[in-house]
Image: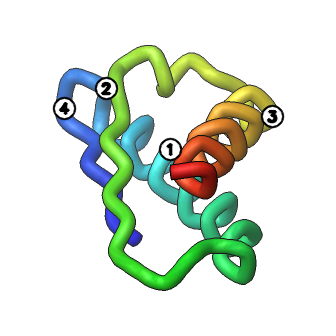
Amino acid sequence: MAFTIGRKVGSAAVRNRLRRRLRMLMRQLAPGLRPGAYLLGVAPPAAGLSFSELEDLVNQIMKQLDRA
């Protein structure tokens, strides 16, 4: 699992907080994911999401990948 979080998302502290949140979410989802490499790109609006909003969004994305 890898994340791309560009400087447009925010300061280093904002990007690191977002990265930590994504890592935690992916740890929770890992047992249900198919084997492979995953790359999540993060856009600037993600910095303004609460943890629960980010969790909902990541869950939706992973469900879409599971259907593919």
Q: Position of residue 20 (x, y in %)?
A: 54, 58
Quick check: 17 left or right of 44? Answer: right
Residue, disc 1? 18
Q: Residue under circle 2?
A: 9
State whether residue 57 is above or below residue 34. above
Quarter of the image where one finds residue 30: bottom right
Instruction: Where is residue 47? Give x, y as percent.
Output: 49, 25
* Contact, mark 4 vs mark 3 (Cβ under 8 Å): no
Q: Nearer the viewer, residue 44 or 10?
A: 44
Q: Could you tell me if residue 21 is visible in this image?
A: no
Three-letter amino acid code at the position of disc 3: Ser
Residue designated by label 4: 7
Give the mark nearest the N terminus, 3 or 2.
2
Pointer 4 or 3: first along the chain? 4
Q: CA distance from mark 4 to mark 1?
A: 12 Å
Residue at (37% x, 50% y) in the render: 40
Q: Earlier in the sequence, mark 1 or mark 3?
A: 1
Pointers 4 and 1 in contact (CB under 8 A)?
no
Q: Which mark is residue 5?
A: none
Give the distance between the C-alpha atoms of the residues marked 3 and 2, in whole angstroms: 19 Å
**What is the residue that sits farthest to the right in this orientation?**
52
Classify 14 as above or below 26.
above
Label 3 residue SS: helix
Label 4 and label 3: CA atoms lie apart by 23 Å
Mark 2 in CB contact with mark 1 (< 8 angstroms): yes
Q: Please tell me which of labels 4 and 1 falls first in the chain.
A: 4
Q: Amino acid at mark 4?
A: Arg
Quarter of the figure with residue 48? top right
Is residue 36 visible in this depiction of the protein?
yes
Q: Which mark is residue 52?
A: 3
Count residues near mark 3 (Cα–Cα under 10 Å), then give few for <14, some for 14-19, many for 20+. few
Say which residue appears at 72% left-offset and 82% top-offset.
31
